[in-house]
Image (cartoon, grey):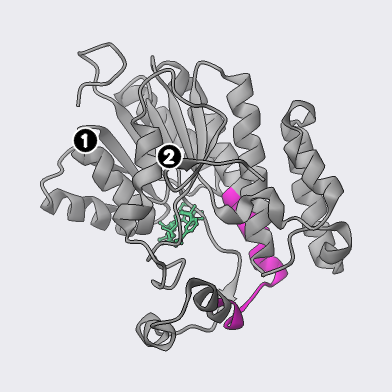
Amino acid sequence: MEGNTGNQSVKEVAVVTGGNRGIGLEICRQLASNGVTVILTARDEKRGAEAVSILGTLGLSNVLFHQLDVSDPSSAVRLADFIKEKFGKLDILVNNAAIAGTTSEIGNPETFRQEVAGMELKERVDRIRKHMTEPYKQAEECLRTNYHGTKAVTKALLPLLRFSSHGRIVNISSRYGLLRFFRGEELKQELSNIDNLSEERLDDLSELFLKDFKDGQVERRGWPTEGGFIAYKVSKALMNAYSRILAKEHPSLCINCVHPGFVQTDMSFQVGDLTVEEGARGALMMALAPKGGMTGGFLNRTEVAPFV
Ligand SMILES: NC(=O)c1ccc[n+]([C@@H]2O[C@H](COP(=O)([O-])OP(=O)(O)OC[C@H]3O[C@@H](n4cnc5c(N)ncnc54)[C@H](OP(=O)(O)O)[C@@H]3O)[C@@H](O)[C@H]2O)c1
């Protein structure tokens, strides 16, 4: 596709994090099918190269691989150097890579799928919860990947996005990052009030959460404890707030968050409602939106929705 940037000679270039499987791989496939040059990134070279080759067998030759571990800021810098050298700009960044911050006893996803077949969505999620624990180590890794990792990649690539005539960032978030899950009114208010929030304060809140988690104080402070996935919810809420701050600071870019829905991927043990194709729809809408569209917003699948 010629870029919808007005400059007919420049092809659009996109980076997708965690592009080797799940929703990320599907976003790569759909972007490439739309003529965008896609840099599919993955933390593991072999898994990334295999994903590129799968897309190659579908006739998509406009996908290339670059290593990126989002939790390692130096790998984001190496990626930025590569893009600068090869393309001189970046049009689309999809921050998709994330982890659930849990450990699970579900060994065989196929057996689990049979176990939950015919159950309502809530029951299926409850069944996943029954099999999982949330140790501190995983909570810490979850914040490091989903919140700090997204920030590090964004920071490294921001100068290249500013070289595009229509730079877009799509942060793959979750409904679990909505502020309604926070029990404490004070935290909820603070995270809603974007005009008074700073990135430094978000970093402090990330530290505070981990401290509370370690000290067994999550309930008392009002972190989102009900229904589990506590670190995941906090990481996505902080990522949402960061996305809104960034959108205010960079009005020339379009920066939005998208909840993909409950999607059949490894993260959901393949028991989601939606196919990856359906789950990628909102992200594609935002990634390919024409200039002058929404910024600082949230999509629940493909519908604009509030952050609360
Ligand atoms: N599936 C759902 O129902 C659902 C619902 C709401 C939101 N989401 C969000 O959608 C996005 C994609 O999730 P998914 O369901 O496709 O999950 P997934 O199948 O578990 O895939 C996650 C991807 O992230 C990568 N990743 C994890 N840590 C990384 C790191 N440090 N550096 C680079 N890549 C890393 C994984 O790479 P490896 O293969 O190397 O592990 C994998 O490619 C996530 O942001 C998730 O929070 C999913």
Span shown in magenta: 128-146
> Which is more toward the observer, 240 or 106?
240
Q: Split into 4 quadrants, where in the image is the N terminus?
A: top left
Question: According to the image, label 1 marks what residue?
Answer: 34
> Which is more toward the observer, 207 or 32?
32
Mark 1 or mark 2, earlier in chain? 1
| Residue at 60% in and 70% down | 102
Q: Is residue 165 magenta?
A: no
Measured as percent of width and height from the top left, residue 99 is found at 53, 60
Amino acid tagged 2: Val
Measured as percent of width and height from the top left, residue 74 is found at 53, 40
Q: Is the magenta stretch mostly helix, strand or loop?
A: helix
| Residue at 45% in and 62% down | 262
Residue 73: image tag: none
How far apart, in angstroms, are the residues tagged by discs 1 and 2?
A: 15 Å
Instruction: Give the side of residue 243 with respect to residue 30, left or right.
Output: right
Instruction: Determine whether 75 is above or below 223 in the image.
Output: above
Instruction: Determine whether 138 is above or below 58 in the image.
Output: below
Measured as percent of width and height from the top left, residue 239 is found at 62, 43
Instruction: Give the side of residue 97 with respect to residue 61, left or right.
Output: right
Amino acid tagged 1: Asn
The crowd level at tag 1 (other Cα within 10 Å; few <14, some 14-19, many 20+) is: some
Measured as percent of width and height from the top left, residue 43 is found at 43, 53
> Which is more toward the observer, 294 or 235?
294
Q: Does the magenta stretch include residue 140?
A: yes
Instruction: Determine whether 189 is above or below 175 in the image.
Output: above
Whether residue 45 is visible, yes or no, is no
Question: According to the image, label 2 marks what residue?
Answer: 94
Q: What element carries label 2?
A: strand
